[in-house]
Amino acid sequence: MSKTLLGKVALVAGGSRGLGAAIAQALADQGADVAISYVSSQEKAAAVVELLKAKGVRAIAIQADQGNPAAAEPLISTVVEAFGKLDILVNNAAVAWQGKTIDDPQIDNAAMDQQWMINTMGVIANIRAASKVLSEGGRIISIGSGLGTRIAFRGTTDYAASKAAVVGYSKGAARDLGGRKITVNVVQAGLMDTDMAAGSKGMLPPIIMDSHAIPRFAELSEVAAAVVFLAGPDAGFITGTVIDVNGGFTA
């Protein structure tokens, strides 16, 4: 089989575990050299790098805190210094702090503000920095959430809004960068068996699972496959849009 991303360089922000690690490996399977970023899990990041190298591609891990937008420029610069270019940016790093309504006196407003910094401002900073160096025909793909489109239950306001903001920014960036044939899209993932949902599989209230047309957790490979498609040569005319991989949650 031909490797559709052979010769491409990808950065997966938040690629040391869970969905990010699955995306990094799926990109490497198609021949891309891959850089991943991580905040604190250096051992997990190193393990992912070894898995990527075993696939015959170049790979590095870079420590960068997406909650600090100033980290974006050095992150992108390090990738370009290591590999000579950047073709694909995948914004995967995020947090999900939910459960309390905005009028709950116990809500942690500082945590909500930090969630905005990681989920929204960090993504925006990465896109801004990458846009300056991306190759013509490059790809920007951000991992969103079905909650960015549909609020099916209470207690998700700030998280949902942080993801909806990424959709709006991506649509604008698609317009700005279209002249360079750079595509900008969002993959809105559903429930996945990752650290973010640790311990919740099989224990969620019926209202959550019943809101899905296919009431199950997504396989990481299913979401990663959508990212690989958008990163590949067959998606050059898809930009400024959202692909839902969430079992019909947004149907």
Image (tube, rainbow, N blue to C red):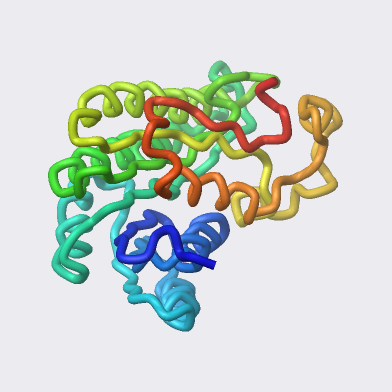
Q: How many marks?
A: 0
Residue 181 lies in quadrant:
top left
Looking at the image, is 129 positioned above or below residue 6? above
Which residue is located at x 64 percent, y 49 percent? Answer: 222
Residue at the top extreme, as displayed = 103
**Can residue 122 be seen?**
yes
**Depth check, front residue: 44 or 228:** 228
Foreground residue, 139 or 109? 139
Residue 237: x %, y % from top left: 38, 32
Q: Is residue 23 left or right of residue 167?
A: right
The residue located at (61%, 19%) in the rendering is 150
Residue 183 is left or right of residue 73, and the answer is: right
Point out residue 164 in the picture as x, y percentages from the top left corner: 46, 24
For the N terminus, which image quadrant? bottom right
Vertical relation: 40 (above or below) 56: above
Q: Is residue 26 above or below residue 162?
A: below
At 20% from the left edge and 55% from the top edge, which residue is drawn?
Answer: 76
Q: Which residue: 54% across, 38% down?
A: 97
244 and 129: which is toward the camera: 244
Q: Examine the rendered structure and indicate whether residue 166 appears above or below residue 6.
A: above
Seen in the image, is 102 located left or right of residue 123? right
* Residue 57 percent coordinates (x, y): 38, 76
Would residue 110 be seen by someone viewing this image from the given angle?
A: no
In-image side of 195 versus 108 (left or right): right
Image spot of residue 247 (x, y percent): 72, 34
Quadrant (top left, top right, bottom left, bottom right) of the C terminus:
top right
Quadrant of residue 123 within the rendered picture: top left
Residue 238, picture quadrant: top left
